Amino acid sequence: MHEALRVAFEASLAFREGLPDRPVAVQATLASLRANLGRPLGDAGEPPDQVIASLVRHADPGIMAEPGPRYFGFVIGGSSDAAVGADWLSSAWDQNCGLYATSPALAVVEETCARWLVELLGLPMGSGVGFVTGCQMAHFTCLAAARHALLARVGWDVEEEGLQGSPRLHIVVGEEVHVTVPRALRFLGLGAGRMTRVPVDAQGRMLASELAKTLKHLEGPTLVCAQVGNVNTGAMDPMAAIADICETHHAWLHVDGAFGLWAAAVPGMRAALKGVERADSWATDAHKWLNVPYDSGVAIVRDARAHRAAMTVAAAYLIQQEGDAARDAVDWVPEFSRRGRGFPIYAQLRALGRDGLAALIDRSCALAHRAAEGLAVIPGARVLNEVALNQVLVRFTPADGSDADAFTKRVVEGVQAEGTCWLSGSTWHGMGVMRVSICGQDTTEDDIDRSVEAIRKVVTGLA
Ligand SMILES: *Cc1c(COP(=O)(O)O)cnc(C)c1O
């Protein structure tokens, strides 16, 4: 009975137990993966346990050790046992989590997570909260609420009339806005090409004085997108000054806090984000720094009525709750049917507790400093950013002083192939860089030291 589930369970345990020792990069090639996985679909079905065993055998060589302790690529967190366990149950329970009527337990779990998160992040009580697939869809959700509220103020019902013939909505972002903001704007019909970009400082922080100048020239509904946690440097926009300016101009202030917003859960770090709580909406990820598995993002909107108005849907056959009797997820997210995304968040928050969450964020930042210090003494290495959070940007110049961009790229490729750790390259201010992002809860000081040593060996081997 349920042999396929047992095979999957055993394989999951074996994978996770092997994570600390497994090379982080994949061993397989595209051709070998295609040869093994890309076969024609048979006419006859196969026994489920054999399907799972075969999937494990053939997929495993193409699985990155992303939840492992030495994966530092992009901004990708690990996943805790509590969160993965709850995620398994979410699949096994197979609830359609759009409505209270179809998933009462999930509805209560998500209303609880909503309360916990708003409190942990120091945001206004009573804010609307939607559990979406990731930060990009959190932007989409928050900016739909912004679009609703800003256009309603000038007498336009965007849900009914759309944007055909609507009043102009001004969109202002920092020069280093994350690509998912314009993408959300595109999907909302607001136009990625309609953004006014405000200059930033050397770390990528929006210059408040430049924002003030920009807004002075704009009349009518205005949306400002700030960020806490620049995807390269980790830098935070000056939120208090930005909030003052937006207040003066009655602009809607949205915050991209994909990972940086979690710093608000650390008492000692709150000062760095001061003013963030004065925004109108916040988008963040749970699958990054909270260490729950994919896909999991959170949209938070101060004006819960605007949030709901932008998302809700009504149909005669839906059984929705009268008023606020219970939570129907369909009111807070763009999806209709959906999985029980709140279960892993709930389990992870309980497993960590307030102190554990603060310690996770704090430790990641301390480890980023340790990595920066270790990398800085490698011959030819230069750390380019102020390590304010969990991100480190480093660039390598060869001993003969030749092309640092090309050399840094070779170092990144060499480190990826070597397998001790994995990190990605990026281009920052026109310079090729290696980017180290630390947001996995299992990473230790020893993992950092081993990784720095592996990078040092690659650099000296290439020089
Ligand atoms: C990762 C990231 C996003 C996008 O998040 P997804 O969960 O991938 O949709 C947006 N903004 C920043 C700053 C990010 O780091």
Image (cartoon, rainbow, N blue to C red):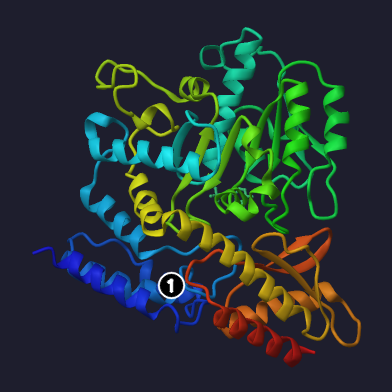
Name of the residue lying farthest toward the bottom: 461
Quarter of the rendering occupied by the C terminus: bottom right
| Image height of 269 relative to 198, above or below | below
Q: Nearer the viewer, residue 264 or 133?
A: 264
Name which residue type carries label 1.
Leu
Please state if 38 lies on the left or on the right of 102 as rendered. Answer: right
Q: Is residue 285 left or right of residue 200?
A: left
Question: At 56% from the left edge and 83% from the top edge, which residue is drawn?
Answer: 446
Q: Which residue is mark 1?
A: 33
Q: Could you tell whether 123 is left or right of 132 in the image?
A: right
Q: Quadrant of residue 115?
A: top left
Q: Position of residue 11 (x, y in %)?
A: 28, 73
Q: Residue at x 59, y 52 (%)?
A: 267
Query: Which residue, as the protein is rendered here, is positioned at the far right?
Result: 401
In this rendering, is residue 287 above or below 68? above
316 relative to 62, above or below: above
State whether residue 178 appears in this view: no
Residue at position x 36%, y 45% in the image: 342
Is residue 129 visible in the rendered image? The answer is yes
Front one among 270 and 408: 270
Left or right, 311 with respect to 36, comes to right
**Residue 127 to residue 423: above or below:** above
Residue 22: x %, y % from top left: 45, 82
The residue shown at (84%, 75%) is 404
The reply to whether the residue tagged 1 has its Cβ within 8 angstroms of ligand 1 is no
Label 1 sits on a secondary structure element that is helix
Q: Quadrant of the N terminus?
A: bottom left
Query: How many labels, in total?
Result: 1
Q: Position of residue 176 (x, y in %)?
A: 76, 47
